[in-house]
Image: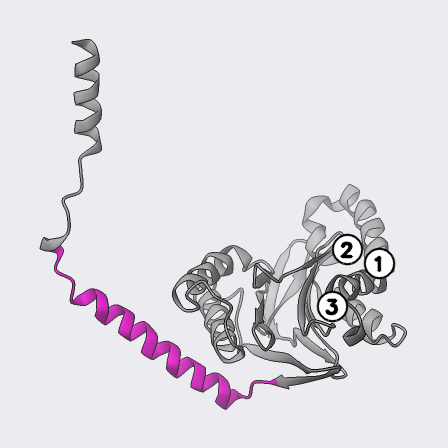
C-alpha cells in the first residue's frame, strides 16, 4: 500500500511519498520492508509510482532510456503528451498481461501489474505536475493544484482539500508551504493506516529558472523542521477550539419535531 502526493506550487512542483513496501503475492501481504518511491532522472524529471516494485522499475527504465527530450521547450500539454508517448508501450504491454491474468486470478492481480504515476516535468510555463493513470492517459494538474495516488488516496484527498482551504487559504501555495503540506499529508495517512503505509516520507522538489531545471530533496532535518511546525499548528488549532463557549452556540433545531409539525398541518 502506498500514498504519493504531488503539489503544483507557485515556484515548483513538490512530490512526496511514504517508504513502506509490502511483500507477498496475489493471496495477500506477508511482510513489510522499505522502498524508494520517488525517483529523480537527471535534473529534468521527478516521478513517483504507485504499484508493484516491478512496474515502478519499468516506468523508470522507460523514461531513462527515452530519446533525449528538451521538456523545457515544450508547452505543458506537449510535455504531457511526450510522457504519454514514452510510457505507451509499457502501458499497452501491462494491459495485455492484465487481461490474461484476470481470467486466472480475478481482479486481485490488477495492483500487481498496473499502476499510476505522478511526474514533475519542466515546460515553457515552468514546472508542471502530470498524472499518468493506469490506462496510460495523462492529466495536467494546474488549477486543481494537487494530485494523490496509491491506496492511501481516499484518506489523502479530503485531508489535502482541508489544507487547501485552511492552510493555503484557497490559493496556490509557495514551495515551502507545499512541502509542509506534503509531509503533513503523508504522515497523516501513515497514522490512519499503520502497518500498510509507513516509513519516513521522501520529498523532492522540481524548480525551474528559464530553460534550466533543478531538483532538490528534503533532508531528515528539513522534515523534522516541518513536523515541528505541524505540531505547533495542530496545538494552536486545538487551543482555538478550547476557548469556545458551548453555551454561546445557537440551539440546534430538532428536525424530527419540524417534520411532525409539517405532517400535522397537512392532516389539518
Residue 94 left/right relative to 6: right
Category of crowding for the residue at label 2, using alpha-carbon neighbours closer than 10 angstroms: few (below 14), some (14–19), many (at least 20): many
Residue sticking out furthest to the right: 67
Q: Nearer the viewer, mark 2 or mark 3?
A: 2
Main SS of the magenta segment? helix
Q: Nearer the viewer, mark 1 or mark 3?
A: 1
The residue at which mark 1 appears reads as 88
The residue at which mark 2 appears reads as 136
Residue 233 left/right relative to 211: left
Q: Of residues 142 and 133, which is closer to you in this image?
A: 142
- Label 1: element kind: helix
Instruction: Name which residue lies at 46% across and 56% down.
Output: 158
* Contact (Cβ within 8 Å) of mark 2 with mark 1: yes
* Contact (Cβ within 8 Å) of mark 1 with mark 3: no
Instruction: Name which residue lies at 18% across and 66% down.
Output: 242
* Contact (Cβ within 8 Å) of mark 2 with mark 3: no
Label annotation for residue 56: 3
- Label 2: element kind: loop
Gap in angstroms between the C-alphas marked 2 and 3:
14 Å
Instruction: Name which residue lies at 52% across and 55% down.
Output: 154
Q: Where 94 falls versus 166 (above or below)?
A: above
Q: Which residues are magenta?
A: 217-246
The x, y position of residue 202, in whole percent, is 58, 78
Q: Residue 171 magenta-drawn?
A: no
Q: Of residues 56 and 158, which is closer to you in this image?
A: 158
Residue sticking out furthest to the top: 268
Circle nearer the N terminus (1, 3): 3
Q: Where 42 falls versus 102 (above or below)?
A: below
Gap in angstroms between the C-alphas marked 2 and 1:
6 Å
Amino acid at each position: 500500500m502506498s500514498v504519493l502526493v504531488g503539489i503544483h506550487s507557485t515556484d515548483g512542483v513538490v512530490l512526496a511519498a511514504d517508504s513502506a513496501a509490502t511483500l507477498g503475492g496475489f493471496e495477500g501481504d506477508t511482510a513489510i520492508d522499505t522502498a524508494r518511491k520517488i525517483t529523480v532522472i537527471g535534473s529534468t524529471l521527478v516521478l513517483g509510482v504507485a504499484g508493484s516494485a516491478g512496474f515502478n522499475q519499468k516506468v523508470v527504465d522507460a523514461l531513462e532510456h527515452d530519446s533525449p527530450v528538451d521538456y523545457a521547450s515544450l508547452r505543458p500539454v506537449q510535455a504531457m503528451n511526450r510522457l504519454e508517448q514514452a510510457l505507451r508501450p509499457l502501458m499497452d504491454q501491462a494491459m495485455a498481461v492484465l487481461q490474461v491474468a484476470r481470467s486466472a486470478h480475478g481482479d486481485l492481480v490488477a495492483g500487481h501489474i498496473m499502476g499510476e504515476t505522478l511526474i514533475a516535468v519542466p515546460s515553457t510555463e515552468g514546472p508542471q505536475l502530470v498524472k499518468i493513470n493506469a490506462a496510460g492517459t495523462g492529466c495536467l494538474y494546474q488549477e486543481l493544484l494537487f494530485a494523490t495516488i496509491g491506496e492511501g488516496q481516499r484518506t489523502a484527498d479530503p485531508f489535502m482539500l482541508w489544507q487547501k482551504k485552511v492552510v493555503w487559504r484557497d490559493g496556490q501555495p509557495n514551495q515551502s508551504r507545499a512541502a509542509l503540506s506534503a509531509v503533513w499529508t503523508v504522515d497523516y495517512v501513515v497514522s490512519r493506516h499503520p502497518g500498510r503505509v509507513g516509513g519516513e516520507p521522501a520529498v523532492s522538489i522540481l524548480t525551474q529558472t528559464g530553460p534550466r531545471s533543478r531538483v532538490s530533496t528534503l533532508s531528515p532535518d528539513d522534515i523534522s523542521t516541518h513536523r515541528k511546525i505541524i505540531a505547533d499548528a495542530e496545538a494552536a488549532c486545538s487551543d482555538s477550539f478550547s476557548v469556545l463557549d458551548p453555551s454561546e452556540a445557537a440551539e440546534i433545531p430538532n428536525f424530527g419535531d419540524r417534520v411532525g409539525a409539517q405532517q400535522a398541518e397537512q392532516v389539518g
